[in-house]
Amino acid sequence: MKYFDLLPIYNTAKSSVKDDPVYLDENRLGHQVPEVKDLSDLKIPTQLVKGNLKLADFYYPSSDLAMRHIVSDRARMLLESFREGNIRFYPCPLKHGKKEINDYWITDTVVFDDEWIDFEKTVFEFNDVKIIEGEAPNTKRYQDNVELMKFKNYGELCDFKYNRPNHLSKLSFVTIEIKEACPFPILNFRSMNTYSVVMNEVVMAEIKSLGMDRGIVFKPFEIPYKKWPGPFED
């Protein structure tokens, strides 16, 4: 079964710190975090989308709500029809131009599926960045050492990421596969650091058949971002 990242790259909402009183409240929603919490008491900043364009079913939110998605009511119902309980949906205030829209939701991922990565067939690239102090005061340079790595399981991967030398070092996948026995049509992976919605070709086909793919691109999941030619090469 093929899997794809859902990327609403042409649909990005904005927010207005100046005009939205929610930004004066510390009890407001922020970006997606690994820890599972009840967010129902948090206030959500109003998301602004262009009024001269037809409303889409999937959006990226403003940067302060990064690693989440904004979805229409019918998109939420479609996602839940394929898998329920892995993503929580909170009502998201939306403005389409000057018109207030009340049937959109923002996601919060609460179930992660990293154990369904086939680590035997998955290869990572570790870019170990070392800081080398220069001879003159307050001068430094950076040295990169790139190596390919494999891990036995998600726990070993987490241990490595937690104990990596410094925050400048980066770990990304070169090849990745999902286990054939995976029962879920929709997946979320904590280890990918993007919290994107990953779906199989059945879900993708349903989204397309319902005309819900306006402004979104489906990236083959097994292709890393830096090797993906982008939507113009599809």
Image (cartoon, rainbow, N blue to C red):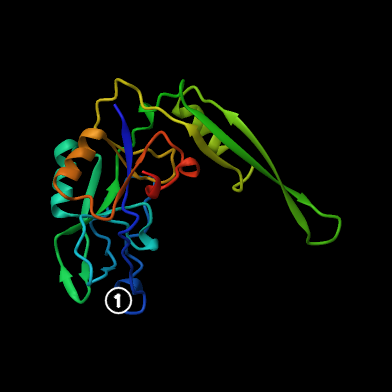
Image spot of residue 86 (x, y percent):
25, 39
Q: Nearer the viewer, residue 192 or 4?
A: 4
Is 132 left or right of 164, judged from the image as shown? Answer: right
Q: Is residue 85 visible?
A: no
Compared with 30, 161 (above or below) is above
Q: Residues within 10 Å of mark 1 (few under 14, many from 20)?
A: few
Q: Nearer the viewer, residue 38 or 107?
A: 107
- As helix, strand or loop, the secondary structure at mark 1 comes to helix
Compared with 138, 228 (above or below) is above
Image spot of residue 156 (x, y percent):
50, 27
Q: Is residue 123 visible?
A: yes
Image spot of residue 142 (x, y percent):
71, 49
* Residue at point 82%, 54% (across, down): 134
Residue of label 1 = 21
Say which amino acid is labelled 1: Pro
* Residue at point 40%, 45% (across, down): 233
User: Quadrant of residue 165 in the image?
Assistant: top right
* Residue at point 51%, 38% (across, down): 172
Compared with 157, 29 (above or below) is below
- In the rendered picture of this protein, how many numbered marks are placed on residues? 1
Is 180 left or right of 74, judged from the image as shown? Answer: right
Q: Nearer the viewer, residue 91 or 176?
A: 176
Q: Nearer the viewer, residue 29 or 100?
A: 100
Q: Given the current orientation, which residue lies at the most extreme bottom position? A: 19
Compared with 203, 67 (above or below) is below
